[in-house]
Image (cartoon, rainbow, N blue to C red):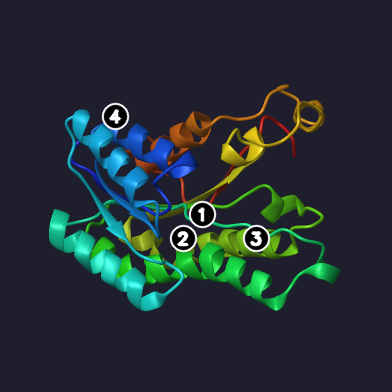
Amino acid sequence: MNLIGKKALITGASRGLGKAIAIKLAELGADIVINDIGNEEEAESVVKEIESLGRNSLFIKADISDFEQAKELVDNALKEIGSIDIVVNNAGITRDNLLLRMSEEDFDSVIDVNLKGVFNITKSILRPILKTRNASIINISSIVGISGNAGQTNYSASKAGVIGFTKSLAKEIAKKNIRVNAIAPGFIETDMTEKLSDDIIESYKSSIPLGRLGTADDIANTVAFLASDISSYITGQVIVVDGGMI
């Protein structure tokens, strides 16, 4: 499996899942455009790591929840690298709370980044990417978009929306040989899980048949598969990566 000659745009890629995805695609030969709303130092570090692999990379700062910024991000990326073959809509936030206590602001902000951000980036790149006639759009959803989770009505709604968006767009553009798929990660080892107590981690593990939390590489490997020509007959799907949890 290789991505030599491919060019990818990855949102929310300064750390965590986005960083792991960026490094994996670069290892397989792709040039990478890194996006994040902040974390400029971390993003530039990812760029340097990718360049050390012999690939081209650049960082473009933008708030993808804002349509004009998302469009400018895509325009600048295309200007710098010429074309984009792979889009990974990874950027996301959480504002967890029970609905009784959840503010309208916290609901809206999660929807704006996690769902509207996917629309903003995809809408902005759609015409250019249709011209490639061999591209892959990969949206990062979540198992809570399928199963739900108490205290995450906003996050679950946003990730369920990403699944519906993915399935519908896949039907719209399949004739152009552009594939659109989603990945629904389960409990993944991240900066967030590092803050949890051992008891909570063990309770999570007990609900996972494989007996462990997922890693960022588990998600990155799945992205690489969907980005490559190996998955050329797969579109409109939600790949659940959760160790068998749901």
> Is label 3 in contact with label 4 (beta carbons under 8 Å)?
no
The residue to which callout 4 is attached is 27
Label 3 to label 2, Cα distance in Å? 16 Å
The amino acid beneath tag 3 is Ala
Q: What residue sits right under mark 3 in the picture?
A: 160
Other residues around mark 4 within 10 Å, as few (<14) / some (14–19) / many (≥20): some
Q: Position of residue 202 (x, y in %)?
A: 79, 26
On the question of residue 135 being in view, the answer is: no
Q: Which residue is mark 2?
A: 170
The amino acid beneath tag 4 is Glu
Q: Earlier in the sequence, mark 3 or mark 1?
A: 3
Gap in Å between the C-alphas at discs 4 and 2? Answer: 27 Å
N-terminal label among 4 and 2: 4
Give the left or right position of residue 32, taking residue 218 as reference: left
Q: Under tag 2, what secondary structure?
A: helix
Corner quadrant of residue 70: bottom left
- Which circle's residue, 3 or 2, is located before the other in the chain? 3
Say what secondary structure mark 3 lies in.
helix
Where the N terminus falls, by quadrant? top left
In this rendering, the label closer to the viewer, 3 or 1: 3
Few, some or many residues within 10 Å of mark 3 (<14, 14–19, 20+) = many
Q: Which mark is residue 236?
A: 1
Which quarter of the figure is the C terminus placed in?
top right
Tell which tag, 3 or 2, sits nearer the viewer: 3
The residue nearer to you, when weighing 89 against 112, is 112
Under circle 4, the secondary element is helix
